[in-house]
Amino acid sequence: MGLLDRLAPRKSETDAPVPGPSAPAVDPVFGTKALRKFLSCLTSRELPVLIDVGPVVGSNVTFFGEQLGCKIFVEDIFADVDRHVRDGKLAALPAFLKKRFPQGSGGVDGILCWDLVDYLDRPAAQELAAELTRVLRPEGALLGFFGTAQPRDTRYTKFIIVDEMNLKHRSYPAARGRQAILLNRDIIRLFAGLRVTDSFLLQNNLREILFRKPA
Amino acid sequence: MWKRDEAVRPASGQPTAAPQPPAPAQVGAAVPRPAETGNRLETGSRLEKDIVNIGKSVVIKGELNGSEDLTIEGHVEGTIQLRDNVLTIGPNGRIKAQVFAKAVIVLGEVTGNVTASDKVDIRDNGSVDGDIVSPRVAIAEGAHFRGSVDMQRKGGSEKGPKQAASQGAASQQQPQPAGAPQRVGA
């Protein structure tokens, strides 16, 4: 080995990727129990119609649209909440939510509510629950997540479907944090027009609740 | 060997004029190819693709039809129909129109319904407010979308719902990076 060879960096040093400051953080993946049941509700229908109240996630759209043949309505209510917070018009949020969903009554087979309710005040949550119940068809399913701890960070979570048993949680900044921890009885009262068919408490302190609309 | 070099050298002794860059494209017309003055230029012209571009300062109101791939950097209001071709909305493009194309790539803003027979691709910072009908839809992280997505299933490639559900989503399609190469030419 010559002197120049010794001075030159080793190949393994030059080829190894150096994570820069902009390298994306790895999103944690958590198990899910209720998603599989939610999917089975959807796949029992021909060309199901789905509402996702969260931000658009490309791979979720592909999953539901390309793989399951759903028609998906992306209605990012988190963005609406942020806009109302920034504009100082939170008092108008319940009235806004009452007119937010253009879908007809009983025209939707499934709703991905994610953890949206945790970020709403009681009046807004009641309006949202009433509207989601209205658009859901009889025997339709709603998947909701509810926190059991009060995190103080003001961040939302994008739930990215890895497979029917796993969700990737990707957080992003929010205008405000979670508002309240709802007890089970509060949740049941909130969605009074629906019945709870499955409820799971996960190790990450998230409650997954699957609702069905009575026939 | 020496004779070949002399043949390339201009007879007058003056340097050969550099190949002219292609003239700016007209709306609805392909970029003209440069005159084929030598083997090198001839080869270059073969490699070139027809590119139709609507520039930043162009505003079109009405119906836009075509049978070539099209890139829009300006403003278009009305209807765009490129049934067998690719429509690219550039980063500066602002569209308020009903769009029908074979494939639609969005890097700018689209307000209106988008129907594509092949694919709709909303890249990073791209925005669509409207309903999408296409068998394939890719939405990158950082893209904005509000509306509905309807992917008509193609017969023959269908999988059973259970099988499809167990295959997962994130592994099926990753959003393409913003800098991914895109086909603009015909």
Image (cartoon, rainbow, N blue to C red):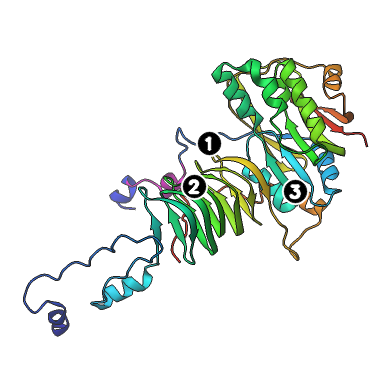
State the image quarter where residue A194 is shown.
top right
**Residue B157 image offset from top left, x and y in percent:** 73, 63
SS of the residue at dot 1?
Answer: loop
Say which chain tag 2 marks. B
Residue on which disc 1 sits: A24
Is there CB contact under 8 Å for labels 3 and 2?
no
- Residue pictured at 83% horizontal, 38% vertical: A106
Q: Position of residue B142 (x, y in %)?
A: 54, 38
State whether discs 3 and 2 lie on one chain.
no
**Would residue B33 be counted in the magenta stretch?**
no
Point out the residue furthest to the left here.
Answer: B12
Which numbered dot is residue B95? 2
Say if labels 1 and 2 share a chain. no
For mark 1, does the 10 Å Cα neighbourhood hold few (<14), some (14 to 19), or many (20 or more) residues?
A: few
The magenta stretch is A8-17
Side of A155 relative to A97 (left or right): left
Q: Are marks 1 and 3 in contact (CB under 8 Å)?
A: no
Q: Earlier in the sequence, mark 1 or mark 3?
A: 1
How far from the left and from the top, in percent, is residue B49? 40, 67
User: For the point 12% across and 77% down, which residue is it?
Assistant: B9
Q: Amino acid at mark 2?
A: Ile
Residue at 79% across, 51% down: A47
Packing grade of label 3 (10 A; few <14, some 14-19, many >=20) is many
Helix, strand or loop status at disc 2: strand
